[in-house]
Image: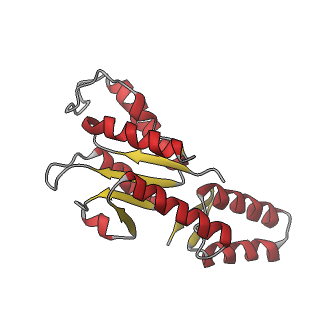
Amino acid sequence: MIVSCYVAAPWGHRLHAKQAKEQLEAAGFVVTSSWIEKHADKPGDSSGLDFDPILLKEEATEDAQDVHKADIFILLNTQKRGEETSGKAVECGMAMAWGKPVILVGEPTNIFHILDVQKVSDIQGAIDVINKWITEYEENTNPILLAADIEALIAKRDAARNSGDIALANKIYEHLQKNGVLLEDQETGTEWRRV
């Protein structure tokens, strides 16, 4: 099973994020955080607002896409309360809205960190949590469906609905609901989120 993770951290702590990325990759996970390798010459405390606005828009879009395609969101919360930066908070909010499991490495500094967030002290703790989730998934005990699994089941449900197999479509809907995934059929397609 291939599991992908997005690693979020303050820009000034990207070396810490790079080390986390290396540990996750050594453990066999895919890291979708392309921001970690970009602009090594950019000052660590820079907001980025002095960069080209077109480039900033492209990078923000790429970051959002990287968060969306990850199965799990890992937040390296390396700053003290009151000193935290906003980028990682926005990314964490996107991950939560998209129903991604969130692992907080460090201390909670935000009201949303008290929600259904797994808290660990270091990146090895995050790796241990992910491996536990994979074991539970494979043993079908308290499974956490990965984003790719959910998307595949939605596609199968859509195909069943289009072919008139309402029984199968309903069975898939109930399976997803039983596993904490809420489907919302829209004109543009089926949206989903974890509940």
Q: Nearer the viewer, residue 45 or 95?
A: 45
Residue 101 vs residue 113: left or right?
right
Residue at screen point 46% across, 34% down? 34
Residue 172 vs residue 182: left or right?
right
Q: Work out whether residue 184 can be spotted.
A: no
Point out the image quarter for the N terminus: bottom right
Residue at screen point 15% across, 48% down? 83
Position of residue 21 measured from the top left corner of the image (x, y, whole percent) = 44, 41
Residue at screen point 54% across, 54% down? 71
Position of residue 90 measured from the top left corner of the image (x, y, whole percent) = 33, 50
Q: Work out whether residue 105 can be spotted.
A: yes
Residue 87 vs residue 59: left or right?
left
Q: Quadrant of residue 136?
A: bottom right
Position of residue 32 measured from the top left corner of the image (x, y, whole percent) = 50, 41
Q: Nearer the viewer, residue 89 or 137?
A: 137
Please say which color scheme the image uses: secondary structure
